[in-house]
Amino acid sequence: MSKKLNISTSLEVYENLQELASEDFLLMEHAVQARSRAYAPYSEFAVGCAILLENNEIVTGNNQENAAYPSGLCAERVALFYAGSQYPGVPVKKMALTAGPMSSDFFKPVPPCGACRQVISEYEKRQENGIEIYFMGTGGKVVKASSMESLLPLSFDKNYL
């Protein structure tokens, strides 16, 4: 006989950037700056990411598109892979994302895509600690997830291999 599995999540919603703690506001400002440098000539949808490492370094990334679409890379993975390469073994504390069209404002918070959720989940499992994730559009409300588990509760990891 089957049983129903209920999964729930809880996210915090801030009305705007000014409601964030100063450290989180600064991290989001880095993400906004990174977004301005995105290479998105095909989708014209720019994404910026900033991550705060345990050693207080801030690493940024932005989406990098390619005419061969699968060859591009999302902002989150650009930042995480750089951090993993340059600061091996240093845990990620927080991540801030901002995303939206290059030619207009977009006030709906944009969470990480599925591929990025999987990669962030892997980093959380590897460091055995959650990563706070803040995300927004180009402005407006900011959503906070306490960890990737809030956004991807049934993640695939090494225990399935």
Image: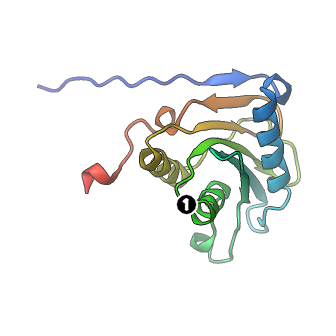
Q: Which residue position is annotated with label 1?
A: 88
Q: Callout 1: 10 Å neighbours few (<14), some, many (20+)?
A: few
Residue 141 position, x and y percent, is 77, 28
In the structure shown, which secondary structural element does the residue marked by tag 1 occupy?
loop
Question: Which residue is painted at 50% across and 54% down in the image?
Answer: 119
Vertical placement of 16 versus 79: above or below? above
Which quarter of the image is occupied by the C terminus? bottom left
Question: Which residue is painted at 52% across and 49% down in the image?
Answer: 120
Residue 73 position, x and y percent, is 63, 65
Vertical placement of 110 versus 119: above or below? above
Which quarter of the image is occupied by the N terminus? top left
Is 73 left, or right, of 129 in this rendering?
A: right
Is 43 left, or right, of 133 in this rendering?
A: right
Is 108 left, or right, of 113 in this rendering?
A: right
Question: Which residue is painted at 53% across and 35% down in the image?
Answer: 147
Amino acid type shown at disc 1: Pro
